[in-house]
Amino acid sequence: MALVENLVLVFVAGLLTALATGLGAIPFFVVDDFSDRWNVALWGVASGIMVSASLFGLVREGLAYGSPILLVPGLLAGVVLVVVGHRVVDSYDHHPEAFEEADFKKLVLILGVLTVHSFPEGVAVGVSFAELGLAGAETVTVLGLGLPVLAVFMTVAISIHNVPEGVAISIPLRTLGVSEWKMVWWAVFSSLPQPIGAVIAFAFVRLAREFLPFGFGFAAGAMVYLVVTEFVPEALEYGRDLPDGGRKELVTGAVAGVLLMVPLAFV
């Protein structure tokens, strides 16, 4: 496939992960609230999936393409991205309540902040497509297209991860009386930067092939650090009123997430 066609395909994959965020609002069409137990479990599943996808997929691929000399700096750079992203995000009012009340200028600002927040997920998707169209790559056929196995797993992983993100965004909007379809829209809106990040990351690893291990490490470092600093604390926040602080639900969800990604270790 030509580069432009590949970029379009990667963009579509990133867009699918963004649309998956809207699934987090779907339960509110039939229920008024989402139990803390389920919220903790969902964040646990997302954590297990992301750590497994990073270790079984991204890190392993990075080592296959080169030595740890490039992989390790990539891991550290991914951590730095998340740290900087957190500082930028914490500097602005980007909470879901602000979405509904924002004028155009503020929406642009919010989208800019969300770009920093969602960029690591997009990077992970883009990097996972590094072998797209290359000879000798392990592929699986999806809708008649031969896609890298890692890309399929990562796209599914990020999509599943985005569901609890959508739930977290929808809960405060529900308290404001926002309609269900608007909650779906704002949930998707929060992840719209992901396809952009995916395209940028894919273009980088394709144009600078020698830095491919760095790219895989970058995505893995960002993902694992996100789990440690964002997913787990978010889960424990929801579980603070549950027995044992929700740790049982968190661990159960994490184990389920790891099991979902186990096949990735054998391809």
Image (tube, helix red, strand yellow):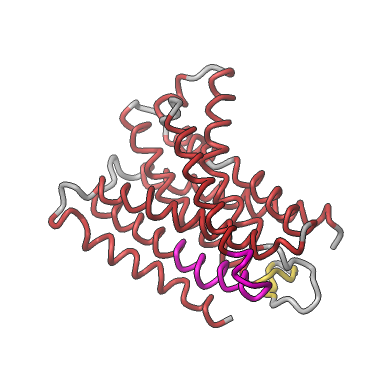
Nearest the viewer among 85 and 238 is 85
124 w.r.t. 25: above or below:
below
User: Which picture quadrant has residue 74?
Assistant: bottom right
5 w.r.t. 112: above or below:
below
User: Which picture quadrant has residue 116?
Assistant: top right
Residue 80 belongs to the span the image colors magenta: no
Q: Residue furthest front?
A: 69
Residue 60 belongs to the span the image colors magenta: yes
Nearest the viewer among 33 and 103 is 103
Q: Main secondary structure of the magenta part?
A: helix
Which contiguous range is marked in magenta? Answer: 50-71
Residue drawn at x 29%, y 54% as measured from the top left: 40
Q: Residue furthest left?
A: 243
Left or right: 103 as drawn, with respect to 234 = right
Left or right: 66 as drawn, with respect to 258 = right
Task: Name the quadrant of the C terminus.
Answer: bottom right
Q: Whole-percent x and y of residue 172?
A: 34, 33
Residue drawn at x 39%, y 38% as measured from the top left: 170
Residue drawn at x 73%, y 68% as measured from the top left: 131
